[in-house]
Image (tube, rainbow, N blue to C red):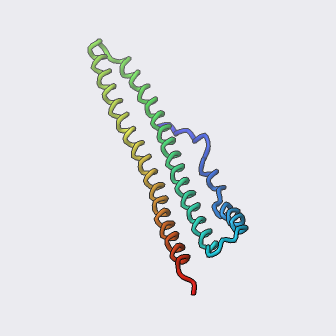
């Protein structure tokens, strides 16, 4: 079997350069200009940093999934081209028109079943990647809501 082609570009290289810490540092500097009474800026910034990290992780998972799907598609294309070449060879060696027609039907059925299997495989790869990315975001949303609730309760406490 032929080696699959290398991807045109590696998206994970670009994702490595994205630093949520630096982004939150800049955001923190901007927010500290405003003095909001009763707001724990450190807690707010820590929460937002976690949000950015979760988003970055989810994007990384999604992009890695996309790369895996693209790689598999390239492999499928290579396999399909090899199978098409074999099919032409088989058909050229078939004898009577009846044998050719029977062989064509058999090859078409095999190709259809492989295509369905490949589509199913790709759909499962995409679904798995989406599920992992969504799970990361959902977990962070839940944690963020808990953090907001805790901050609100701290603000609500009466001052003596």
Question: Camera-side residue: 73 or 149?
Answer: 149
| Residue shown at the point (48%, 70%) measured from the top left | 146
Q: Position of residue 114 (x, y in %)?
A: 36, 34
115 up-or-down from 151: above or below: above
52 up-or-down from 146: above or below: above
Extreme-bottom residue of the structure: 160
Q: How many labels does the image show?
A: 0
Question: Camera-side residue: 41 or 142?
Answer: 41
Lateral position of residue 131 relative to residue 25, left or right: left
Q: Where is residue 5 in the image (x, y as percent from the top left)?
A: 55, 38
Lateral position of residue 106 relative to residue 58, left or right: left
Lateral position of residue 17 relative to residue 124, left or right: right
Extreme-top residue of the structure: 97
| Residue shown at the point (54%, 49%) measured from the top left | 63
| Residue shown at the point (39%, 46%) measured from the top left | 124
Q: Which picture quadrant has residue 154?
A: bottom right
142 up-or-down from 78: above or below: below
Q: Which picture quadrant has residue 91?
A: top left
Question: Camera-side residue: 3 or 28?
Answer: 28
Q: Position of residue 81 (x, y in %)?
A: 46, 29
| Residue shown at the point (65%, 63%) measured from the top left | 24
Q: Position of residue 49 (x, y in %)?
A: 60, 65
Quadrant location of the C terminus in the rendered image: bottom right
Question: Camera-side residue: 57 or 82?
Answer: 57
112 up-or-down from 135: above or below: above
């Amino acid at each position: 079997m032929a080696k699959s082609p290398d991807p045109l570009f590696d998206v994970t290289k670009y994702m490595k350069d994205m630093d949520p810490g630096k982004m939150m540092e800049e955001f923190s500097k901007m927010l500290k200009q405003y003095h909001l009474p009763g707001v724990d800026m450190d807690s707010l910034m820590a929460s937002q940093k976690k949000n950015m990290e979760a988003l970055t992780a989810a994007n990384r998972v999604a992009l890695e999934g996309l790369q895996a799907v693209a790689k598999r598609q390239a492999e499928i294309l290579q396999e399909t081209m090899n199978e098409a070449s074999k099919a032409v060879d088989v058909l050229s060696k078939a004898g009577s028109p009846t044998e050719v027609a029977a062989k064509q039907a058999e090859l078409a059925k095999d190709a259809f079943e492989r295509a369905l299997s490949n589509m199913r495989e790709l759909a499962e790869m995409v679904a798995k990647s989406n599920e992992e990315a969504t799970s990361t975001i959902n977990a962070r949303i839940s944690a963020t809501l808990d953090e907001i609730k805790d901050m609100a309760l701290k603000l609500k406490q009466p001052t003596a």
